Amino acid sequence: MTTAFEPIDLPGHRLANRIAMAPMTRSRAAQGGLPTALMAEYYTQRASAGLIVTEGIQPSAVGQGYPDTPGLHSAEQIAAWRTVTDAVHAAGGLIFAQLMHTGRIGHPDLLPDGLVNVAPSAVTARGQVYTHEGPKDFVEPRALTDGEVHATVAEYAAAARAAVAAGFDGVELHGANGYLIHQFLAPGSNRRTDEWGGSPAARIRFAVAAVKAVAEAIGAEGTALRLSPGNPFNDIDEPEPEPAYTALVDAVEPLGLAYLHVMEVPGTRELTTALRKRFSGVFVLNPATEGPTGPAALALVEDGTADLVSYGQLFLANPDLPARLKAGGPFNTANPATFYGGGAEGYTDYPAL
């Protein structure tokens, strides 16, 4: 029986264990979307994960959806990220950059002057986003033109090349949680009638194009994709996700990606299993659970449901999480005051095992 504490190979990499640190928005970047010394400390403390996936990093200025999130589209950002990746590698860790274009999720107040949020269609998401002036309603995004869709695909590829220059071991494209790629996948947010919308085969076209562009830019072995089929977060309407997601996985399967990462929502295990069977590479699962993912999720590696299990909140409070899981605890309890914001308390100083 395989356990989560055994090594596993990604293309070109040997992971020390099958416990991944899930991507989590932190909002701790400095002005200009620059990662900081605090962020380097944070990721380095968690280098015992088999794989670290960073917080979402915007691949372009218009891709930013939250305050104080980092970017990978300038020379200064590349240089600043290099201090993070060098520190993680020195501690024996492996780190992928998650590329997250938030699309319609955000607000013009978070963007440089003159930019507005963009999306597949001019459909406003219900809800609010936090800004430096407080919560504000989402605004109607501007629908991308065909030329801009192609340009956005190219921005993902450029950000992937920047990630490699910054020392990352690979990139994960964020196709989940209601952000731009997910907005193209979901019929509620994608009402296009051109080649990028309509049928499931058309709605997956943007995701496939972005994945292929990144794989061509940095190699498929450094390219991964995260999905969350049926996830209603950020006002996504996706009543019948199976046709689009099975077609999407079938389309990227031949590329030889580093891994596929599924964030599962309740009631979708059958679809999770179907995607697992269709994808021959490494399958990472952030399972649907009541409350934060806990030790019980390790059984998903043992029974073959997943190759790796990704942990979010538990990794915030337990930087040495693999050792704690192997020892059966004890586990620090996450303090919500540490979740977001540069001035939040206790960012890196949870007690060690």
Image (cartoon, rainbow, N blue to C red):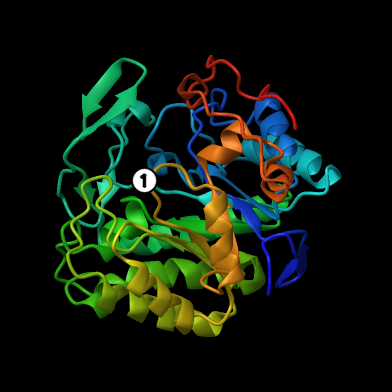
Residue lying at 66% horizontally and 71% vertically, measured from the top left: 221
Q: Please state which of residues 88 and 201 is positioned toward the viewer in this rendering.
A: 88
Quarter of the image with the N terminus is: bottom right
Relative height, residue 149 to residue 320 (above, below): below
Q: Is residue 148 visible?
A: no
- The number of numbered badges drawn on the structure is 1
Q: Which residue is mark 1?
A: 102
Q: Position of residue 159 (x, y in %)?
A: 56, 52
Q: Amino acid at mark 1?
A: Thr
**220 to the left or right of 106:** right
Residue lying at 42% horizontally and 83% vertically, measured from the top left: 250
Q: Secondary structure at mark 1?
A: loop
Relative height, residue 164 to residue 300 (above, below): above
Q: Residues within 10 Å of mark 1 (few under 14, many from 20)?
A: many
Q: Position of residue 50 (x, y in %)?
A: 70, 55
Relative height, residue 156 to residue 105 (above, below): below
Residue lying at 21% horizontally and 47% vertically, measured from the top left: 235
Q: Please state which of residues 277 and 343 is positioned toward the viewer in this rendering.
A: 277
Quarter of the image with the C terminus is: top right
**51 to the left or right of 195:** right
**127 to the left or right of 180:** left
Q: Is residue 74 visible?
A: yes
Residue lying at 37% horizontally and 76% vertically, measured from the top left: 248
Q: Position of residue 54 (x, y in %)?
A: 58, 45
Q: Please state which of residues 168 and 307 is positioned toward the viewer in this rendering.
A: 307
Relative height, residue 185 to residue 352 (above, below): below
**7 to the left or right of 63:** right
Q: Position of residue 8 (x, y in %)?
A: 72, 69
